[in-house]
Amino acid sequence: MELFEHLSLGFGVAFTPINLVYCLVGCILGTLIGVLPGIGPVATIAMLLPATYALPPVSALIMLAGIYYGAQYGGSTTAILVNLPGESSSVVTCIDGYQMARKGRAGPALAAAGLGSFFAGCVGTLILAAFAPPLTELAFKFGPAEYFALMTLGLIGAVVLASGSLLKAIAMIVLGLLLGLIGTDVNSGVARFSFDIPELTDGLGFVVIAMGVFGYGEIISNLAQPEHEREVFTAKVSGLMPTKQDFKDMTPAVLRGTLLGSSLGILPGGGALLSAFAAYALEKKMKMKPGEVPFGQGNIRGVAAPESANNAGSQTSFIPLLTLGIPPNAVMALMVGAMTIHNIQPGPQVMTSNPELFWGLIASMWIGNAMLVILNLPLIGIWIKLLTVPYRYLFPAIVLFCAIGVYSTNNNTWDVWMVGLFGVVGYIFVKLGAEPAPLLLGFILGPMMEENLRRALLLSRGDWSVFVTRPLSAGLLAAGALMLIIVLLPAVKNKREEAFVEE
Amino acid sequence: MNIKSQKDFFSGLMFMGVGVAFAWGATTYNVGSGARMGPGYFPLMLGVLMAILGAAITFKALVVETVGGDKIGKWAWKPLFFIILANLVFGALLAGLPIIKLPAFGMIVAIYALTFIASMAETGWKFKNTFILATVLAVGSYLAFVLALKLQFPVWPAFIAG
């Protein structure tokens, strides 16, 4: 089987000592930021990008990927023990996980989250390995018109599946696309919107935007809120092992969560967050067994399903990135940046031109998931200690790491000024209720979209109908239009708003 | 006319303003035609689209009722000011600011300054605690970024290190 050949190549790469170390570092960092509320994977990956310059590209990507899926594990710990989502994708885990902890069943809740995540991670990795090659084949049939249509579909998917106002999300994407165009136009050499500032002719750095908006913007709005009364169940997390009955209850939930998460992760705009919400909604629809604890009062299924789903989703969201070169969410948009820094053009050719990178990364995810189970279950005590660190010691450190990270991207203070500016912009977004994740996605896709639109229209001599006469492109655009129509239907619209409301 | 959603009203205005600005800026470049797109074509298209979206959001904010008026709420001027200031002072101290003839003070001094200014964003900060935190961060950053990762920073003030 070709799959096994590929995987053995991948494991050969991933099992080298240096890559194992970076995988471990990524997983530890991921768990760390997952546990700590107030800092997410987007800001962390942006912070660490400059530090990966010196690394070989495989090691760099292995570490950055570890941060993303590691955060899904760590986030559940905080959700269960403190009733605060350490990661946005753990919001629903709070509901039943915290109730279990209050009933003295924190151990089984943590175990259900950890084991469910591990199972889902393994399945997600296998799906990634199995589906990547055929999708890559398909990608080679894509011309500029198809790429443009695919990116449009991806952006529509990102707004449709995101929470909050649809119109605002679209406007944020357009703003991102426009910001992405700042700098020298590759075709004409004209410096656009640069106001004769030499630094701006290279365009805005995505590290600057990610850190300013996600790092500083969030810190400022966190500080504006009064400190929460935290009730931490640190005293006794004893008896990690779930009972036989627990296993019986959680196994089908884990399976359903994994299946749902894997399929939603592939969708543009999907990923960990959406998967968790959908899995919880599905579990609530399932028939209750007699004698089962109701949802919202500490049902183990309400922990196992969303945690499995968010991990499966974070794994499979690498599929569009690795096969088509299109990032489906903000974290993957940063991964595009990371690949570009290392001179790898994301897209279907990665698999053939850098097979050791492609399969090494996939194999490392499986190893990383195994490391994470060990990091998160037997070593849970360490992470609980971390939860007792007050925010007042954390936020100056985060500000510092952002500032150092952004300076070292170009060794230039210009970026430090810009990140300050985008910090203010980020806070304005928070105040106006404008979700920033679509902006980052648009920012990365902006230049790609313009280039493909230009090529497509050049080939068709300015005839816009090229997008609907080519079957693949027409199909993709129709899918996008269908998604928009479905979401705007009144019945679905209400359901969608319901799904994103916390209980 | 009443504003039904403050957040949407002002974000709509913001999108309209930025959209118009980008579209107007795009017209100063060669726009070209579909078959031969100039550098202004795509930005003009997007700018107009964003202005329309902004108008729609503003309109919706004036028409559709929301619970409690969707107020923006108080601005947290203090954290905003101190966090951004900490960032700017860090940049200026780290590498110097030739415009105001500020020499480079290096990373260590910059970290102490950043930690103190950032801490002021929060009420109830204490000098001793902040000093300890700054020292931990300075030593940690030196070990991690300068010794381990070998990033190129000015570490000490230029007039001491030369």
Image: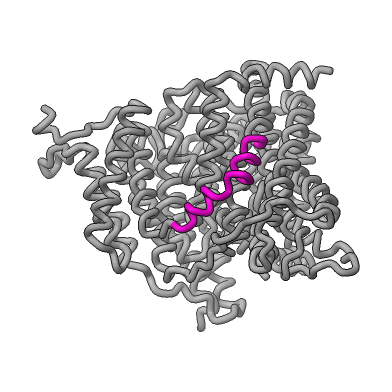
Q: Quadrant of the N terminus of chain A?
A: top right
> From this viewpoint, is residue A117 visible?
yes
> From this viewpoint, is residue A174 visible?
no
What scheme was used to colour the molecule?
A: one colour
Toward the viewer: A473 or B69? B69
Image check: A300 left or right of B19? right
The quarter holding residue A11 reads: top right
Tell me which residue sits at (67%, 26%) in the image: A363
Question: Looking at the image, is A361 positioned above or below residue A69?
Answer: above
Number of labelled discs?
0
Toward the viewer: B77 or A78? A78
Q: Position of residue B58 (x, y in %)?
A: 53, 69
Question: Looking at the image, is A230 positioned above or below residue A14?
Answer: below
Q: Quadrant of the C terminus of chain A?
A: bottom right
Tell me which residue sits at (68%, 45%) in the image: A311
Q: Main secondary structure of the magenta part?
A: helix
Q: Position of residue A297 (x, y in %)?
A: 73, 70
Q: Position of residue A94 (x, y in %)?
A: 64, 62
Question: Looking at the image, is A90 positioned above or below residue A440?
Answer: below
Q: Please say whether residue A375 is one of the residues in the magenta stretch.
A: yes
The quarter holding residue A500 reads: bottom right
| Most distant residue in the bottom direction | B1
The quarter holding residue B17 reads: bottom left
Tell me which residue sits at (69%, 16%) in the image: A9
Q: Which residues are magenta?
A: A369-388
Toward the viewer: A302 or B63? A302
Toward the viewer: A357 or A96? A96
Q: Position of residue A117 (x, y in %)?
A: 70, 45
Q: Please say whether residue B14 is one of the residues in the magenta stretch.
A: no
